Structure formats: structure tokens, C-alpha cells
Image: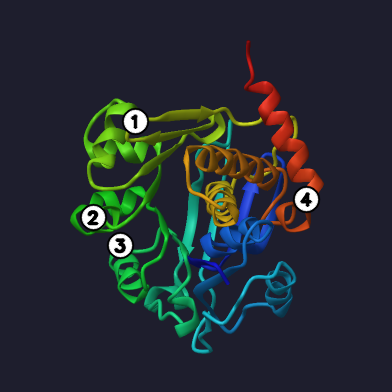
């Protein structure tokens, strides 16, 4: 196990203009670990309830995900989110959120996880992210994600997480909100001042940007004619990104750019079906094919 992912394991009930999925497997740790499993050996820390189907355990094991850190709480049910998408599907509309056993989740890391060289902190409470960081033993790279709720309600705690992270992954509206500016590039530079070496700005269906202290790189989203459900695309991107970094021999600028492309490709597969149905059943050749396509559409001379 060389990559630890801490976050939710959930059930999602999702409706889009192209169909509906009832209690489909979801959550940050799920989407991230399935995506990362093509490049790294991920382990997850999360919690599920007494209703969690064995077939989902089997799916994660089949993908090589270590489940020693997955807690099973028999006292309640698994976190369940319900929502829908309209129009361009760039924004989910929540119908219902049932935290269930996730409400009392405490991320206790197995001893074997604490020395993992790579860490992906999903967008759980900043206080819980800090608890995870306190349990880790000198990871080589920490990638953290967050959400607008924590920016609104716990900005000081979130800043503590950002200051201890190597890579901050955040979307365009969130970074403008956190830094109180309308300019994405200015906001990214403000985040870099907190100590991170890279900042990733997610632009949804418009692509992604990567900022370093003296570098900038951007990629468009792949043009797809078949998009069914964007749920989990951001977590899938992050899993592919850090999974590819975990496979790299050196963490130089080229490695980060290759990782950004890999995350983009993995997210492109995620949105083509509900849950992780597509990303759980890829071949290495599928990933390489889309990496080649992405390289071709971003070349010019």
C-alpha cells in the first residue's frame, strides 16, 4: 500500500437527463481509490453501515484496494446522498443528505497506513483532516481537497490543512471564495503563499489548471459525445492524479503534468456512466488511448 485515501464511502441516488441510479456506490474514497488503483496500491479509511452490500466490498478488493482501514459500524446505515442534474450538468442539486454512520466518523489509521508515502485527504471536516495528518509519519506528498461548506463555516481550520499540504485541489468558485478575489490566477498564487508547491483549479467540463510557484499548465476536458453522470468526477480526477504521481520516480514538473493528464482521462471515463461502473472496468490500453487523444488535441506548432 503506497497511497492512503481518507474520505467517504457512500450510496448515491442520482438522476440526470440520461437516467437514474438508486443507491449506487459512491463517495470520495470509493471514486478516488478505484481511479488510483490503475497506477498505485491504494488503501482507504472510511466508514460504512450495516446495509453496505458485500458486492461493493468485492468490487474494491478486485481493484486491489486495501480495506484494512474501512470501518463497519453495525449501529446504523451508510452515508446516503440523493440529488439530480439539469441542463449542462455542471452543478448537482441536492435532494437529501443522510450522514448516518458518517456523522460520527473518526479516521483512525491502521499502523501500516501511517507510513504511506502518498496521502489524498478527501473533503471531510478540516478538523478530521488535521487528525489524519497528525497520525501520518512524514508522507512524501499530501493532496487535499475541500468544499464550499468548510470555506464558509471553518476557514481558519481549513487554512491549517492547506498550510500542511503539498498540493491543494479546489474548484474555481471555491478558490475565489476562499481568497476573496474574482481572479483565479491571483487566488491560486495566494494559496501557494500558504506553503503548497502546487495548486490545482478544477473547472468542471471546461478543464483544469495547475499552478506552481513559477509554472503554469492547463488542459481542456476531453470532448465527449456520451456523458451520463458527473458525480464523482472530481474525486476520480484526484485519484488518477495522485495515483500517477505515486507511480512516478521523481516528482518534477513533467510528472505533475503527466499526472494532471491522467486525472483528466480518468474523469472522462467516470462521467460516461453512473457510479464507478466505467472506471472499475477499464483496460490499461483504454487509458493510454485517451492520453494519446488528449495529447493530440493540445498540440500545436
Q: Which element type, helix, strand or loop, lies under badge 1?
A: loop
Q: Which residue is mark 4?
A: 284
Which numbered circle lies on residue 214? 1
Q: Which element type, helix, strand or loop, lies under badge 2?
A: helix
Q: Residues within 10 Å of mark 4 (few under 14, many from 20)?
A: few
Q: Quadrant of the N terminus?
A: bottom right
Left or right, 170 with reference to 29:
left
Q: Which residue is mark 3?
A: 126
The residue at the point 34 percent across, 30 percent down is: 214
* Mark toward the start of the polypeptide (1 vs 3): 3
Where 4 sits versus 180, above or below? below
Q: Are marks 4 and 2 in contact (CB under 8 Å)?
A: no
Q: Are marks 1 and 3 in contact (CB under 8 Å)?
A: no
Which numbered circle lies on residue 153? 2
Q: From the top left corner, tell me how far across and down residue 47 is, in percent.
A: 50, 77
Q: CA distance from mark 4 to mark 3?
A: 35 Å
Q: Residues within 10 Å of mark 2 (few under 14, many from 20)?
A: few
Amino acid at each position: 500500500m503506497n497511497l492512503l485515501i481518507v474520505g467517504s464511502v457512500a450510496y448515491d441516488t442520482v438522476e440526470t437527463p440520461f437516467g437514474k441510479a438508486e443507491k449506487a456506490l459512491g463517495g470520495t474514497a470509493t471514486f478516488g481509490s478505484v481511479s488510483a488503483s490503475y497506477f498505485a496500491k491504494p488503501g482507504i479509511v472510511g466508514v460504512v453501515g450495516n446495509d453496505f452490500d458485500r458486492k461493493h466490498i468485492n468490487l474494491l478488493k478486485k481493484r486491489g484496494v486495501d480495506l484494512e482501514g474501512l470501518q463497519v459500524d453495525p449501529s446504523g446505515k451508510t452515508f446516503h446522498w440523493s440529488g439530480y442534474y439539469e441542463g449542462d450538468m455542471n452543478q448537482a442539486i441536492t435532494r437529501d443528505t443522510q450522514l448516518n454512520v458518517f456523522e460520527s466518523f473518526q479516521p483512525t489509521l491502521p499502523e501500516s497506513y501511517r507510513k504511506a508515502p502518498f496521502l489524498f485527504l478527501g473533503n471531510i471536516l478540516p478538523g478530521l483532516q488535521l487528525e489524519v495528518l497528525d497520525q501520518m509519519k512524514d508522507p512524501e506528498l499530501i493532496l487535499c481537497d475541500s468544499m464550499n461548506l468548510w470555506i464558509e463555516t471553518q476557514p481558519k481550520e481549513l487554512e491549517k490543512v492547506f498550510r500542511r499540504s503539498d498540493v491543494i485541489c479546489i474548484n474555481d468558485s471555491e478558490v475565489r471564495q476562499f481568497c476573496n478575489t474574482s481572479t483565479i490566477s491571483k487566488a491560486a498564487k495566494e494559496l501557494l503563499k500558504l506553503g503548497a508547491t502546487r495548486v490545482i483549479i478544477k473547472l468542471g467540463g471546461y478543464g483544469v489548471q495547475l499552478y506552481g510557484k513559477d509554472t503554469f499548465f492547463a488542459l481542456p476536458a476531453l470532448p465527449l459525445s456520451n456523458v451520463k453522470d458527473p458525480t464523482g468526477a472530481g474525486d476520480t480526477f484526484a485519484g488518477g492524479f495522485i495515483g500517477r504521481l505515486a507511480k512516478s520516480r521523481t516528482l518534477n514538473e513533467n510528472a505533475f503534468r503527466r499526472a494532471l493528464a491522467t486525472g483528466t482521462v480518468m474523469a472522462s471515463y467516470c462521467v460516461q456512466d453512473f457510479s464507478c461502473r466505467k472506471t472499475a472496468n477499464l483496460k490499461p490500453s483504454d487509458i493510454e488511448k485517451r492520453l494519446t487523444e488528449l495529447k493530440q488535441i493540445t498540440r500545436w506548432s
